[in-house]
Image: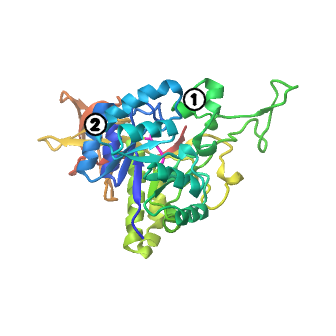
Amino acid sequence: MRKPELLIPASSLEVLKTAVIFGADAVYIGGEAYGLRAKAKNFSMEDMKEGISFAHNHGVRVFVTANILAHNEDLAGVEDYLQELKELKPDALIIADPGIFTIAKRVCPEIEVHISTQANNTNYLTYKFWHELGARRVVAARELSLKEIKELREKIPKNLEIEAFVHGAMCISYSGRCLLSNYFTGRDANQGACTHPCRWKYAVVEEQRPGEYLPVYENERGTYIFNSKDLCMIEHIPEILDAGIDSLKIEGRMKTALYVATVARTYRKAIDDYFEDVKKYQENMEWYKAEIGKCTYRQFTTGFFFGKPDENTQIYDSNTYMTEYTYLGIVGEKNSQNEYCIEQRNKFTIGEQIEVMKPDGRNIAVTVKSIRDEDGNKMESAPHPKQKLWIDVGMELEQYDILRRHEHKENV
């Protein structure tokens, strides 16, 4: 049994570097066009070049999404875009549309093509179809069970890789091909502009009684009927490997560096522990579950992997995230006064206890001893987001350590 790839999302150069340091084998990113996360920060060509170089220097691969469902007007721009990407040498392109696939095979045949989940890959003949056209990997539709994936693995070529989502937000629509956003707001999810209407609150209105909102569930006047729990398979690494999945994919190209670091580090340790000793994996399960719960999430489900989801996989009473920790910043360079540079993300103060999150799995409680701004002025607190600061926490830190603070609340 070969060790699977851990594939982590990145919304920006900062998050890419975090994913690499905290355990990714590969990172997937989007450029400024033709990906399905238009609202994410995404990568300029300059940042993409730096990110690919950084990842490659650490032995990590980079995949670039170009997985919109293209219209005629998109095709000329796609060709120009792929010509630019060709020079940056990413390791793979993630594509859903046969037209974009055709352009990619002509413009940059040396770059691997992976077929996006957006292409509805639900059976072994579909996998064989893409393989014969030159695809190296196909991403399983989220509607597949592990039993189906295992059968699929047995009937496709051995050199065709299977990638599957194992953690993150679930979509209400088939393989993510949603029309709700376009219908309600004119923003097309299949063009990368989803407004996430599955997280909105709904009620039933009978045609002859306008304005009278009827309960959908229990006794509430309105409910989040499309609001799925998040996928989490940290407890099922053995079953995932038994099904023959080659790449374990984390959803979240709009998530923070704290989220990415938390999920990457936890799955990295779970995979490594399992391959070192199955008993070690089992004994550390409570640690994995505790750690994975320290990032934002909407409760957890195993999705379709063990059969079709039922009423227990939905959240009916709210669309809030569970949040245990607040992201404060990433550690940067050190100065001669043993202070460390960070770009502050949330407010913290002198004397406050915070936590240093290490890539190796350690979480170290420290106290903020001093804060200075860029000009050297002393500060009692750091209230301004993205302000560059120099801090002392009374211990040696390393570049890319994450600073966070424990909370006890829910955030929308």
Q: Is residue 343 visible?
A: no
Q: Is residue 230 visible?
A: yes
Compare residues 339 and 94 and report the one nearer the observer. 94
Is residue 16 inside the magenta stretch? Answer: no
Element on which disc 1 rests: loop
Element on which disc 2 rests: helix
Q: Which mark, residue 87?
A: 2
Q: Residue at x 51, y 39 (%)?
A: 98
Toward which corner of the image does residue 270 lie, by quadrant? bottom left
Check the image and report above or below for 374 versus 176.
above
Mark 1–mark 2 CB contact (< 8 Å)? no
- Amino acid beneath label 1: Asp
Disc 1 to disc 2, C-alpha distance: 30 Å
**Quadrant of the image containing the N terminus:** bottom left
Q: Estimate the x, y position of residue 261 in percent, counting from the top left.
A: 38, 49
Q: Estimate the x, y position of residue 120 in percent, counting from the top left.
A: 58, 46
Compare residues 209 and 20 and report the one nearer the observer. 20
* Mark 1 or 2, nearer chain start: 2
**Mark 1 Cα-neighbour bin, 10 Å: few <14, some 14–19, many ≥20:** many
Q: Which mark, residue 188?
A: 1
Circle count: 2
**Quadrant of the image containing the C terminus:** top right
- Amino acid beneath label 2: Glu
**Mark 2 Cα-neighbour bin, 10 Å: few <14, some 14–19, many ≥20:** few
Q: Is residue 320 left or right of residue 21?
A: right
Compare residues 52 and 333 and report the one nearer the observer. 52
The magenta-colored residue range is 251-255
1 or 2: mark nearer the eye = 2
Q: Estimate the x, y position of residue 361 in percent, counting from the top left.
A: 34, 59
Q: From the image, give the main secondary structure of the stretch colored magenta.
A: loop
Which residue is farthest left?
Answer: 336
Toward which corner of the image does residue 5 lie, by quadrant? bottom left
